[in-house]
C-alpha cells in the first residue's frame, strides 16, 4: 500500500491484522496489552456513537466524532505516563478515555453546560481547545515549566492537519526547538480540515516540518495502534530525557463528518471512505487478537457488552446533566472582585433571571 | 424587481453580482469553495467562477488577510470569509496594522479593497468562540469601516457596496438571522453603506442597534406600543463611521435613547454612541442614554445565552428605566 | 523610606522585588535578558535571576503570550514584555481568546497570572507602530484588567501588584515618561491597583486621564489656575475596571468633565467614561462631558505627533468648550 | 572556513577574493558586471554612512544601517528583473538602490516625514515593513496575483533571521507551498534580531525550513555577492517558470548596531565583529577586481568620488526635506469621505494648527 501520499509511513500491523516489522521499531506489547488496547478502542468508539445519537436526539448541541481515529488516539494515550501533561484539541475522546476522564465529562462542552468539562489537574489532561493551534503554544509553555521544575515528565499536544497551518502551531515548533522543550507534537492527519483536504495545507508530508525546524518528525500509520504506541513512547522518552521535541504525524482518516453540523457528501467520495474502512484500526486489532492470540468470540462479546454499559450510563448521566443558574456566567471570569461582575449579578437578580451563587 | 430570499441567499446573490461586475474580485476563506462555506454563503460560487477566484484557503486567518493585502497591491479586491467571529483574532495584526494603515502608509497609492466578512453575534446555540461580537475592536481602529446588515435586502446590497469600496470594510453578518426570509429589491440599493435607517418611527424613545437586534428591537417596540409607548427604532447599519446625524435628529425629537448591543459595554460602540449623543443632545435628553448590552463576561455557554443576550424583556426594562426619569 | 528614581528604574526595582518575593515568577520577552530590554526596564535581572527566569524569547509575540498560558498551567507566573505597543497585535488572539478566558473556561481551575507590559503612547519621536495606545481593545475584553502607571512611585508598586494578581493584567507604561524622575516610597503601596487617584484637587472641572497625560493635565490645570479656573485632576490608573466612584464623586462636585487620552475617540476608554458619567451624573453635569483625544487617523509621522497628541493647548481648548455651556 | 554554523553555505568568491566553484553553481557575471556590482555596493555603503551621520546630527529620527549586508542585498537586487515586485523590510537600502529608489526616498521614513517614501509602482518595490513578518504574507498574496494575471514575473520578499520566528512568516511558507506561488523568500541571516542571536530563533540552519514546508532552501554566503546573485537568479527563474517558491538564507553579519538607538556592546564581542570584518563583501569584490580583472586604483577612486557626490546630494536633499502641514495626517486615511476625518480637519483649523490640503 505504498503510495506517494503515504511516504515514510511507520507500520507494525498491516490492515489485515498481520504483524510487520519496520526498521528500528518493534512492538513491545504482549497479548494482554493488545487486548486492553482493543477494549479501549471499542469503548471509545461506543462512547462516540452514543454521543452522536444523543446529538441527533437533540440532547447535545454538537458532536465532533473520532470515528476512524481510535487507533491514533489509543496508541498515543497508552504511551503517556500519568505525570505527563496533555493538551488536547476537541476530538481526542479516546485519549481522554485513556487518561481516565469520565465520558460524561467529555460531553459537557457539547451539552453546552461547560466550556471545560473536568479538572485538568486530576487527569493531567487540559480542557478542549477550539481555537486551532492555540493549545500547541500552551503545551510548549507547559513544557518550559517542566524544565524549570526539573521534572522528568513530558507534554503532549494534539492538533489536526488543518491546524498545522496556523501561525501558533508553527511558532510553537520554533519555540520548542529553541528551548529544547520536552514536548511531543501529535498531529492527527485525518486528511481533512472540515472540507479542506490536507493537500491544501501542505503539498509535502507534514512530518517533514519537524526536521525543517530542527527536531525529528515521524509519520506513523494512525490506524495502527501498535505503531503509534511505539513511536509515541519513544518520542515521549526523548522528551523526558531532555532530548527535545518530536513531531509525530499520525496518518489516519476521519470516517465521519467533521461534526454533526457537517455534510461530508459535499466534498468527498464515498469510495474514499470505503477504502479507509478496510484499514479500520479496531478490525485490525481484532484480527491480530484472534489470529495471533487466539482470543475468542465471547471475549470480544464481553468487551462489546462493557461498552454498551458505558454507553447506557453515559446516556443517563447526560440526560440528568443540566445547567440551570445563569448566574454562573459571572463566576470565575475574574479571580478577584470586579465591579462589572457585581453589577451584572445585581442586574440578573433584579430581572429575576438568576439566583445568587457562592 | 423584488424577490423573497434568506440572508444567506441574499449574500450569495450579492456576491455573485459583485463577482460579475468586477473580474478582479476574489473570494477567499476556509471551506468557502467546495463546501460553499459552513453557512453556505458562497455556495456554488466556486463552481461558477472557478477555484482561481473563489479560493479555498489553508487554515490560517492571518494569511487570509495578509495575502489579501498583497493581492490588493497586485490590483485585486478580496472578500474574505472568517469562518466565525472568534477566529478573526489570529488575523487581528494584519487587520489593524496592515489593512487599516496601508492606504495611509503609501500616501494613498495602495488601495485596500478588502472586505472581511464576519458571521457575528450569538443566538445559534454554538460552543465557545462561535458567538462573539467583536465590532468595537474594529470601530476603534482608524482606517477601517464597520458595517452590519440585518435584512436580506441590506445583505444583498451592502455586500455589493462593501465589495466596491476602496476602503477596507469589516462586514458583520448576524448569523442568527441567516435563515430569515425577506424581500429583496434587486434593481437599486435604497441606502448608502454608511447610513443609519429609521425602521420604525416613534416619538417617546429612540432605540438604536444593529444586526440581529433590529428584529428584537422591533418586537420590543411593538410590545411597548401595546403599553402606550412609542419607540423609534433605528438600524445603525454602519458602526464606524456612525451616522450620528440620524440618531441625533431622532433623539432631539424623542428626548430619550436606548442603545442595544450584544457586545459588552466597556469601550464599545454603544458607549461611543452614548458619549456622542450625550454631548450633541445635552439639552434635549430628558433621561440619561442607556445601553442594554451583553454582560462583562466571556460569551457564556449556550444554555445561558438567552440571558446574556439583550432580550425583549431586558430591553423593555431599559425602556422603563429611561422613562422613570420623567416621573 | 523614599528614593528618587526614574520610571524605568522603578519598574526594574519593582520587578526585582516581585521576583524575589515569588520564585515562580518569570520574565519573558524579546531582548529583555542580555540587553535588558530596549528601554532597559529589565536591566541586570537576567544576571541576577538567571536565564531560566528572565527569558530572552524568539521573535514571536503570539508565542510569548501562548507559552505564558502554558507556564501558568504549570504553576508559573509571567511578566511579559511586548517590545512596543504596536507589536502586541500578533499576540491579540492569545490574549483575548486564551489569557482572558482560560480562568472561566476551566471553571476557575487555571489561574492566569500573566502580566503583559506594553510601553505605550507616543511622544518619543518614533517611527510607525511605536506609539500606539491600544488600551481600549483590552478594556473591551472581559477577563482582562488594564492599568497604567504615571509616576515612578506607581510604577514601582503597580508592577508588583500586577505581578501578584491572579487575574491577567495589561500593564501600560507611558514610554515618554520612562526617564522622568520622582520619589518612590518603598515601604508600602499607597493605593490599590484599581483605584483612581485625585492628584490635584479642584472645584470647577474634573479632568481625568492616564499614563503620560497625568503630567500634561497637571500642567493644564496650573495654566488654568492662572486664569482663575480650578481643575481637579484624576489619574485613572486603572482603565478596566474603571474606578467610576472616584470620578463620579468628583464630577458631582465640579459638574464638569474633560477626559484626556491619546487613543482615538471611537469606542474608547474615554467614550466609556463619558457614557457612564453622563448617566451617573445626569443631573449634576452642567455641560456635556468631553473627550480630548487623538484624532481618528493612524498615529502620524512623528513630526506631527505633537499636533496629534492632546497638548496643554488642546486640553485648555476643551476646558473652554465645556465652560462655555454656562454662559 | 567550514564550521557547523556555516553548514551548506554556497560560495563562489572566497573572503580573500578568490573565485571558488561550488557544485552546480558558477558565476555568470563578467568583469564589467562585477565592477558595476562593486559600485552599487560602495555607493550603498556610502548612503548608509551618510544616513548614520545625519542621524547623529539630529537630522534623522533613526537609522537602520545595512553595514556588512551590501553583498547579500546587491547580489539579490541584481538578480531581480524590473517587472518583479519586491517587498522589503526596513534595512534593504542597497536593494532599494538597485531598484532605482532615490536615496532621499529611503530616508524619508527615518526623517519622519513619511511612513512610506516612494511610489511602489514606479519601482516595483513596496514600502518598508516595520511589523516583522507582515510583509512576507503580502508577498505571497502579490504572487497569487501574478498567477491570476498569468504574468511570468516573480515576487521577492526580504526579512531577517529574527522575523523568521513570526507566525506570519511561517504561514507565508505554508501558503506559498500550497499555491505554488512565484515568490522568493530572501532571509538575511545577519546573526541577530536586535540583541538576540539567531541561535535563539533556531538551533538548526534556517534554510532547512524550506524543505520542511515542501520547497527548496539554500544557504548562501551573504557576503559573496556573486553567489547570492546566482542563487537568487535561479530561484527567481524557478518562480517565474511556475515551479514555486524558494527560501534563500543569506548568511551574513550586521556589522553595525541594530539601529542608531542600539548599543551592541551590551550583547556581542568585538572579536566577532573583527572576524566578520575579514569577510567584508566590498573588500572581497575589490580584491577580485584588482586581481582577476586588473582594475586599477583610479577606477576605484572614481567610484569613491561618485559615492561622495551621491552622499552630498543626499545630505542637501534631506536637509531641505520638511513636513510642515499637520493637516496631512488626515489625508489618505480613507479613500472615501469620512465624518471623523472632516471633524478632525475642522478641529485643526479652528485650533490654528493646520492649513487645508487638497
Ligand atoms: C483559528 C480557528 N479557525 C477556524 C476554526 C474553525 N474550524 C474548526 S475545526 C476546523 C478544521 C480543523 O481541521 P483539523 O485541524 O485538521 O482538525 P480535525 O477537525 O480534522 O480534527 C475549522 C476550520 C477554528 N476552530 N479555529
Ligand atoms: C512584530 C514585531 N515585533 C517586534 C518588533 C521590534 N523589532 C524591530 S527589529 C527587531 C529585530 C529584527 O531582527 P531580524 O528579523 O533579524 O532583522 P534585522 O533587524 O536583523 O535586519 C525587533 C525585535 C517589530 N518590529 N515587529
Ligand atoms: Mg483534520
Ligand atoms: Mg537579523
Image: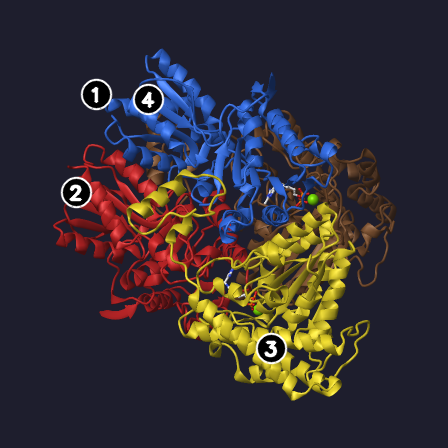
Chain colours: A brown, B blue, C red, D yellow
Crowding around mark 1 (Cα neighbors within 10 Å: few <14, some 14 to 19, many 20+) is: few
Image position, residue B29 (x, y; %): 64, 41
Residue B205 disc label: 4
Disc 3 and disc 2 in contact, CB within 8 angstroms: no
Is D148 left or right of C265, judged from the image as shown? right
Q: Which residue is mark 3?
A: D42
Give above or below for A133 relative to A296: below
Same chain? Circles 4 and 2: no
Q: Secondary structure at mark 3?
A: helix
Crowding around mark 4 (Cα neighbors within 10 Å: few <14, some 14 to 19, many 20+) is: many
Image position, residue B221 (x, y; %): 39, 18
Image position, residue A59 (x, y; %): 59, 27
Is C205 left or right of A257, judged from the image as shown? left
Q: Which residue is mark 1?
A: B327
Instruction: Please tell me which residue lies in front, C75 or A17.
Output: C75
4 or 1: mark nearer the eye: 4
Residue C254 disc label: 2
4 or 3: mark nearer the eye: 3
Disc 1 and disc 3 in contact, CB within 8 angstroms: no
Amino acid at each position: 500500500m505504498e503510495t506517494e501520499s503515504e511516504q515514510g509511513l511507520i507500520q507494525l500491523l498491516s490492515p489485515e491484522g498481520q504483524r510487520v516489522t519496520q526498521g528500528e521499531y518493534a512492538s513491545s506489547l504482549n497479548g494482554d496489552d493488545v487486548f486492553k488496547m482493543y477494549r479501549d478502542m471499542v469503548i471509545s468508539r461506543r462512547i462516540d456513537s452514543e454521543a452522536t445519537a444523543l446529538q441527533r436526539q437533540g440532547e447535545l448541541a454538537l458532536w465532533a466524532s473520532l470515528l476512524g481515529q481510535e487507533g491514533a488516539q489509543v496508541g498515543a494515550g497508552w504511551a503517556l505516563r500519568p505525570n505527563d501533561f496533555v493538551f488536547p484539541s476537541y476530538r481526542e475522546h479516546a485519549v481522554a478515555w485513556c487518561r481516565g476522564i469520565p465520558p460524561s465529562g467529555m460531553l459537557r462542552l457539547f451539552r453546552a453546560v461547560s466550556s471545560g468539562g473536568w479538572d485538568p489537574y486530576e487527569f493531567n489532561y487540559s480542557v478542549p481547545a477550539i481555537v486551532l493551534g492555540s493549545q500547541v503554544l500552551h503545551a510548549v509553555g507547559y513544557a518550559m515549566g517542566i524544565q524549570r521544575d526539573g521534572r522528568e515528565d513530558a507534554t503532549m499536544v494534539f492538533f489536526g492537519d488543518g491546524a498545522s497551518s496556523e501561525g501558533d502551531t508553527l511558532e510553537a515548533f520554533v519555540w520548542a526547538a529553541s528551548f529544547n522543550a520536552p514536548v511531543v507534537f501529535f498531529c492527527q492527519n485525518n486528511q481533512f480540515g472540515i472540507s479542506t483536504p490536507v493537500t491544501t495545507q501542505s503539498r509535502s508530508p507534514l512530518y517533514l516540518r519537524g526536521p525543517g525546524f530542527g527536531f525529528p518528525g515521524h509519520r506513523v500509520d494512525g490506524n495502527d495502534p501498535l505503531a503509534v504506541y511505539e513511536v509515541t513512547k519513544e518520542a515521549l522518552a526523548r522528551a523526558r530525557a531532555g532530548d527535545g521535541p518530536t513531531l509525530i504525524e499520525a496518518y489516519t482518516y476521519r470516517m465521519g463528518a467533521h461534526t454533526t453540523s457537517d455534510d461530508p457528501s459535499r466534498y468527498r467520495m464515498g469510495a474514499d471512505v470505503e477504502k479507509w474502512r478496510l484499514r479500520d484500526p479496531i478490525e485490525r486489532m481484532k484480527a491480530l487478537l484472534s489470529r495471533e492470540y487466539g482470543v475468542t468470540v465471547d471475549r470480544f462479546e464481553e468487551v462489546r457488552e462493557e461498552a454498551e454499559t458505558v454507553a447506557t450510563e453515559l446516556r443517563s448521566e447526560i440526560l440528568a446533566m443540566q445547567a440551570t443558574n445563569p448566574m454562573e456566567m459571572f463566576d470565575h471570569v475574574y479571580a478577584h472582585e470586579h465591579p462589572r461582575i457585581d453589577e451584572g449579578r445585581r442586574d440578573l437578580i433584579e430581572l429575576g433571571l438568576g439566583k445568587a451563587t457562592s | 424587481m423584488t424577490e423573497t430570499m434568506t440572508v444567506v441567499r441574499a449574500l450569495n446573490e450579492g456576491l455573485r453580482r459583485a463577482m460579475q461586475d468586477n473580474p478582479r474580485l476574489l473570494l477567499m476563506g476556509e471551506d468557502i469553495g467546495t463546501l460553499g462555506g459552513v453557512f453556505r454563503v458562497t455556495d456554488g460560487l466556486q463552481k461558477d467562477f472557478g477555484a482561481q477566484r473563489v479560493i479555498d484557503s489553508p487554515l490560517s486567518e492571518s494569511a487570509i488577510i495578509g495575502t489579501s493585502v498583497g493581492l490588493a497591491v497586485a490590483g485585486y479586491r478580496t472578500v474574505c470569509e472568517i469562518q466565525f467571529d472568534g477566529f478573526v483574532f489570529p488575523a487581528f495584526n494584519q487587520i489593524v496594522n496592515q489593512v487599516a494603515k496601508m492606504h495611509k502608509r503609501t500616501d494613498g497609492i495602495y488601495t485596500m479593497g478588502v472586505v472581511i466578512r464576519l458571521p457575528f453575534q450569538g443566538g445559534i446555540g454554538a460552543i465557545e468562540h462561535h458567538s462573539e461580537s467583536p465590532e468595537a475592536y474594529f470601530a476603534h481602529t482608524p482606517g477601517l469601516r464597520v458595517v452590519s446588515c440585518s435584512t436580506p435586502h441590506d445583505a444583498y446590497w451592502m455586500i455589493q457596496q462593501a465589495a466596491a469600496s476602496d476602503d477596507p470594510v469589516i462586514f458583520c453578518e448576524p448569523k442568527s438571522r441567516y435563515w430569515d426570509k425577506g424581500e429583496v429589491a434587486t434593481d437599486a440599493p435604497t441606502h448608502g453603506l454608511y447610513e443609519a435607517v429609521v425602521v420604525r418611527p416613534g416619538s417617546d424613545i429612540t432605540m438604536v442597534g444593529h444586526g440581529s437586534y433590529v428584529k428584537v428591537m422591533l418586537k420590543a417596540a411593538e410590545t411597548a406600543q401595546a403599553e402606550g409607548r412609542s419607540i423609534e427604532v433605528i438600524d445603525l447599519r454602519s458602526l464606524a463611521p456612525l451616522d450620528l446625524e440620524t440618531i441625533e435628529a431622532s433623539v432631539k425629537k424623542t428626548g430619550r435613547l436606548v442603545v442595544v448591543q450584544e457586545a459588552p459595554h466597556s469601550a464599545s460602540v454603544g458607549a461611543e454612541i452614548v458619549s456622542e449623543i450625550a454631548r450633541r443632545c445635552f439639552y434635549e435628553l430628558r433621561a440619561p442614554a442607556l445601553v442594554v448590552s451583553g454582560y462583562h463576561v466571556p460569551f457564556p455557554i449556550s444554555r445561558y445565552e438567552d440571558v446574556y443576550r439583550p432580550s425583549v424583556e431586558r430591553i423593555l426594562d431599559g425602556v422603563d428605566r429611561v422613562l422613570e426619569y420623567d416621573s
